[in-house]
Image (cartoon, rainbow, N blue to C red):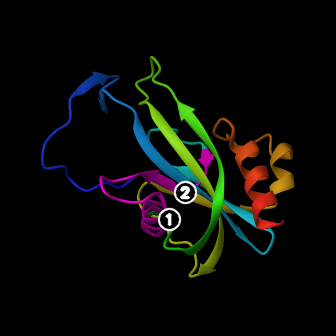
Amino acid sequence: MAAQKPTSIPSCRIEADAMQPSHPQLAVSAAIFRDGKVLLVRRARSPAKGFYSLPGGRVEFGESLHQALAREVDEETGLAIEIVGLAGWREVLPSTGGAGHYLIMSFAARWTAREPVLNEELDDFRWLAPDALGGLGDLKLTWGLDEVIQAAARLIGS
């Protein structure tokens, strides 16, 4: 989740050796569809290290949700996308493991150009059929991922 350096440091608390803001963070993610498959990416670091999820990240001050989503997808995967609509949202609350408090707005999107080139935040990607997620017992998926992908597939018409 790339972010520009702030001009002032927000109030933070330290948990599990990680600096976390003391207030909720707004984030976006994209269920990107290409040829009937959706892109899953594996997080290379916290939060959700080792889990497959959707590309995305924090919304920067003054940025619209769509601007943030296009930027984050480009930074994390190199892909160009067409945003179709809001597929759902998830709230991630702080835990004893040091996770932050995030409100994640998840959008349905179509792949439009380029091939995936992952940045340092991700270490794997897979294009998978949306209806195959339930049978992927060996993959660790972030909470609520299947529901968001199914809602996004309905928006896309897959």
Nearer-the-camera pick, 31 or 141? 31
- Where does residue 15 sit, x and y in percent of width and height? 33, 22
Which quarter of the figure has residue 152?
Answer: bottom right
Q: Please give left or right for residue 41 compared with residue 66 in the image.
A: right
Q: Please give left or right for residue 82 compared with residue 49 in the image.
A: right
- State yes or no: discs 1 and 2 in contact (Cβ < 8 Å): yes
Bounds of the magenta segment: 52-75
Residue 44 makes an appearance in the image: no
Query: Label 1 neighbourhood size at 10 Å, few (<14), some (14-19), many (20+)?
Result: many
Q: Residue at 58% of width from left, 73% of height from top?
A: 81
Closer to the N terminus: mark 1 or mark 2? 2
Nearer-the-camera pick, 57 or 154? 154
- Residue 89: give its label: none
Q: Please give left or right for residue 136 compared with residue 71 in the image.
A: right
Nearer-the-camera pick, 129 or 89? 89
Q: Residue at 41% of width from left, 58% of height from top?
A: 120
Q: Amino acid at mark 1?
A: Val
Q: Is 61 one of the magenta-colored residues?
A: yes
- Where does residue 128 sit, x and y in percent of width and height? 77, 61
Please identify the residue farthest to the left as the structure is shown. 8
Nearer-the-camera pick, 49 or 8? 8
Please identify the residue farthest to the bottom as the structure is shown. 113
Q: Residue at 81% of width from left, 58% of height from top?
A: 154
Residue that carries the numbered disc 1 in the rendered image: 73
Which quarter of the figure has residue 147?
Answer: top right
Numbered disc 2: secondary structure = loop
Q: Residue at 34% of width from left, 29% of height from top?
A: 23
For the C terminus, the image quarter is: bottom right
- Where does residue 148 sit, x and y in percent of width and height? 70, 47
- Residue 55: give its label: 2
